[in-house]
Image (cartoon, rainbow, N blue to C red):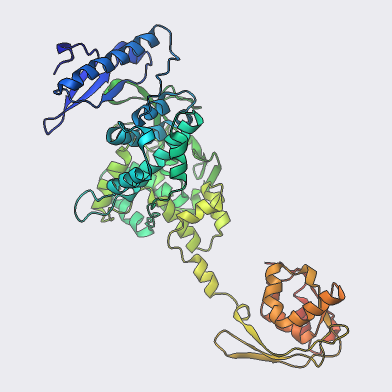
């Protein structure tokens, strides 16, 4: 029904496929162009219900008056909070003090999708009437499978709850009634989170993808994927992104693109350019997420160098990854869409995404024996915990454990330890045998010579004290009783502790070389000095 049939300025009716209608109030085009927000407001009324027609007229007139007041100069006009969830959503998006204003434009777009869903499904609910049962019910409904046999949509349901937490946190800070109570309810309640992604791109995926991409005339997809896999860079850091022209960003020459319906202008930023290839083989880039500088020597990747050589010299200007069909960087979602077409032709499963190349690079590096902190620096992470989340099924750590020296896996079976009652030294020597984890004998320990070596217990780490308490526990107790800072050990016992890995437990073990008749045993005990506490 047209808006001129009754007094509802700005009313627009949009038809659904099933014949039902959606009502919107739409701001005037010239005022929208001047920067007025919101451009549209969804009206949750029934146009054919006589009781709702008056409400539609009142709401449209109110929104129209706010729009004209903004044009007249009252641009700081803030619509009041009316107690509904829809009102809180609107204020969260439009309030200049809202944290919504501090996130990046692409994050706001993601937020807007969830906020539209919340407003559509629960917007009419009054906050003072909401309780824990409502949130549980909303979560359970949202996570239901899209169709029979499909998996539960836990990620979608948890995303709604997370957005509600943000809304109520904002409402608490803005002192809107009811928000503090609801924020406390959600803070004290836990909802099942989606599982972490465990899929990664592997080398055989890349090797199958590149020939297919070249065959299809998509050298840009082959080059972009190879850079992601070989360097571990994020997709956004490789292909770039489009942001609103009014967004603040340090850019040089601008590459502009008209947005959907021509309403806004976008510019390309943050992607790799040929200027980032210093000398043709060293790739240097500042990452967009953390601001860290990463550098990669492409001379170690013949596959990547071969793809770069395929790019004609005249084309080596500006963005590194260019959509062949458009002659500019890929538009939003176009890179992933075109990548999937080639991936299916190459036999790559649909559950492997282009963005899994970063996880594949990190996992491959760990499998090759690289230290986690080295990988963290190479990919631009600020914390090692972030790098560990990208390591999916790496065998590097388990291989290192399997290759540990045999003596590091050995243990000492103690048969008799007796301390001297006065000085705490060993009386009668030490008798025992060294066995490996499988029970096989490594060697026997003979009774100690008269001279002693000693260990200082105050230099032992707490873990070290617990680990050796079975061997020198009586001496530790005697040492504490005498308030001494030194425990005397027989050379044989020092040697036994060295065999089981005392170098990982003590800061320092002091011994006299002439305490041993066997020079090999003396060298073994002396090598314990100046070691790490582990």
390 left or right, relative to 440? left
In which quadrant will I find the C terminus?
bottom right
Q: Quadrant of residue 129?
A: top left
Q: Position of residue 364 (x, y in %)?
A: 45, 59
Q: Residue furthest top?
A: 72
Q: Is residue 161 above or below residue 256?
A: below
Q: Nearer the viewer, residue 154 or 382?
A: 154
x 51%, y 27%: residue: 250
Q: Position of residue 239 (x, y in %)?
A: 40, 38
Q: Nearer the viewer, residue 6 or 397?
A: 6
Q: Is residue 412 above or below residue 457?
A: below
Q: Residue furthest front?
A: 129
Q: Is residue 507 visible?
A: yes
Q: Is residue 369 above or below residue 317?
A: below
Q: Is residue 310 visible?
A: no
Q: Position of residue 32 (x, y in %)?
A: 33, 15
Q: Is residue 293 above or below residue 405?
A: above
């Amino acid at each position: 029904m047209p808006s001129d049939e009754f007094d509802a300025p700005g009313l627009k009716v949009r038809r659904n496929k099933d014949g039902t209608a959606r009502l919107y109030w739409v701001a005037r085009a010239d005022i929208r162009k001047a920067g007025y927000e919101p451009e549209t407001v969804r009206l949750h009324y029934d146009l054919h219900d006589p009781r709702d027609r008056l409400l539609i007229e009142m709401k449209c007139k109110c929104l129209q008056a706010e729009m004209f007041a903004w044009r007249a100069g009252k641009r700081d006009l803030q619509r009041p909070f009316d107690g509904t969830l829809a009102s809180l959503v609107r204020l969260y998006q439009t309030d200049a003090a809202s944290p919504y204003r501090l996130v990046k434009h692409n994050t706001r777009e993601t937020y807007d999708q969830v906020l539209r869903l919340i407003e559509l499904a629960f917007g009419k609910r009054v906050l003072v009437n909401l309780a824990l049962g409502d949130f549980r019910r909303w979560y359970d409904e949202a996570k239901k499978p899209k169709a029979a046999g499909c998996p539960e949509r836990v990620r979608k349901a948890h995303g709604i709850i997370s957005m509600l937490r943000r809304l109520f946190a904002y409402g608490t800070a803005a002192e809107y009634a009811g928000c503090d109570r609801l924020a406390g309810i959600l803070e004290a309640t836990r909802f099942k989170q989606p599982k972490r992604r465990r899929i990664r791109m592997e080398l055989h995926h890349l090797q199958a993808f590149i020939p297919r991409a070249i065959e299809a005339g998509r050298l840009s997809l082959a080059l972009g994927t190879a850079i992601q896999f070989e360097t571990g860079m994020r997709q956004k850091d490789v292909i770039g992104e489009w942001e609103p022209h009014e967004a603040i960003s340090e850019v040089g020459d601008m590459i502009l693109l008209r947005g959907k319906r021509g309403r806004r202008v976008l510019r390309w930023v943050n992607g790799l350019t040929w200027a980032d290839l210093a000398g043709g083989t060293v790739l240097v880039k500042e990452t967009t997420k953390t601001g860290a500088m990463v550098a990669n020597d492409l001379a170690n990747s013949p596959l990547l160098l071969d793809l770069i050589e395929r790019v004609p010299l005249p084309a080596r200007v500006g963005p590194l990854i260019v959509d062949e069909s458009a002659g500019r960087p890929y538009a939003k979602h176009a890179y992933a869409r075109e990548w999937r077409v080639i991936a299916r032709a190459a036999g790559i499963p649909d559950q492997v995404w282009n963005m899994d190349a970063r996880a594949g690079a990190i996992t491959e590096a760990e499998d090759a024996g690289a230290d986690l902190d080295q990988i963290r620096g190479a990919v631009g992470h600020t914390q090692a915990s972030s790098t560990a989340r990208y390591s999916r099924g790496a065998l590097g750590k388990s291989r290192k454990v399997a290759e540990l020296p045999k003596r590091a896996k050995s243990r000492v079976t103690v048969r008799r330890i007796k301390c001297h009652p006065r000085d705490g030294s060993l009386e009668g020597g030490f008798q025992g045998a060294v066995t490996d984890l499988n029970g096989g004998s490594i060697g026997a320990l003979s009774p100690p010579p008269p001279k002693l070596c000693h260990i200082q217990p105050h230099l032992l780490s707490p873990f070290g004290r617990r680990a050796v308490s079975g061997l020198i526990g009586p001496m530790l107790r005697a040492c504490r009783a005498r308030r001494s800072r030194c425990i005397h050990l027989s050379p044989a016992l020092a040697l036994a502790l060295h065999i089981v890995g005392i170098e990982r437990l003590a800061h320092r073990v002091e011994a006299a070389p002439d305490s041993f008749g066997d020079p090999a045993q003396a060298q073994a005990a002396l090598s314990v000095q100046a070691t790490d506490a582990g």
